[in-house]
Amino acid sequence: MLDTLTITNIATVLVCLLISMTVHEFMHAYVGFKLGDTTAMEHGRVSFNPLHHIDPVMTLALPAVTLLLFHFPFLAAKPVPFDPRRLKYDEYGAALLAAAGPFSNLALAFLAALVLRFFDLGAFLDQAMAFFVELNVALFIFNLVPIPPLDGSRVLYAFAPEPLQDVMERLEPIGFYIIFALVLWGGAGGWLANLNDLVLNLLP
């Protein structure tokens, strides 16, 4: 889908990204609300409207540039606000909130894989659905990498000893640059790609 940057392919990629991102951010907000924190609800983030989750620079400008330069869209949605003091289960509640996003992408990949397995949608839609599966598996794996501010760091933080928590807090201001370098490096030597392949092989 990303091999040829036609208008149709770019539009398909953007639609898949918007759907995947919106469900991901909605689940963060919804789980936070269910755990007792109304912060995301007050900011209008418990919503399937993608406009509520878009950051003009990180969600629109950055993926457009990286898609043209590197043939992959690197982006981030507007972070879902939450107040850890209002969440049930303290740090474990924050871990549940964080995990909800990537696991929603895994669920989307599983559902799309089922559609591909049992229905013939035609050549173009089959290709788009296959990309949707691969995209959501990639989002699932990538967001669980335990580097701040990715979701995996919040999950790890809940279970980490205090010295490791201190290290993670120090990394947070530069975490985005580490993540971008990781992506440009090809997933640290391809281990992210290997994890992607493992999960894809487990899908129907």
Image (spheres, rainbow, N blue to C red):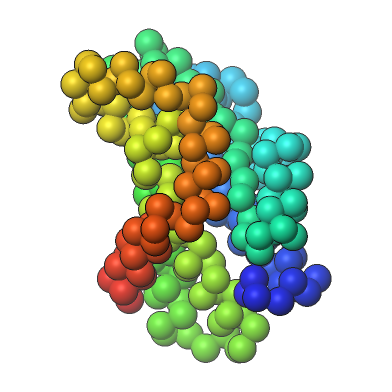
Question: As rendered, which of 164 and 201 lies closer to the eye?
Answer: 164
Using the image, determine if residue 53 lies above or below residue 165.
below
Q: Is 202 displayed left or right of 79 in the figure?
A: left
Looking at this view, name the residue that lies furthest to the right: 7
The percent coordinates of residue 183 (x first, y second) are 51, 51
The percent coordinates of residue 51 (x first, y second) are 71, 40
Quadrant location of residue 146?
top left
Q: Which residue is drawn at 31% across and 74% down?
A: 201
Quadrant location of residue 59?
top right
Using the image, determine if residue 62 lies above or below residue 119.
above
Using the image, determine if residue 12 lies above or below residue 191.
below
Question: As rendered, which of 12 and 111 lies closer to the eye?
Answer: 12
Q: Which of the image's four quarters has the N terminus?
A: bottom right
Q: Which residue is drawn at 62% across and 46% down?
A: 75
Q: Which residue is drawn at 43% across and 45% down?
A: 143
The percent coordinates of residue 70 (x first, y second) are 66, 60
Question: As rendered, which of 13 and 22 lies closer to the eye?
Answer: 13
Using the image, determine if residue 153 lies above or below residue 126.
above
Residue 27 makes an appearance in the image: no
Quadrant location of residue 159?
top left
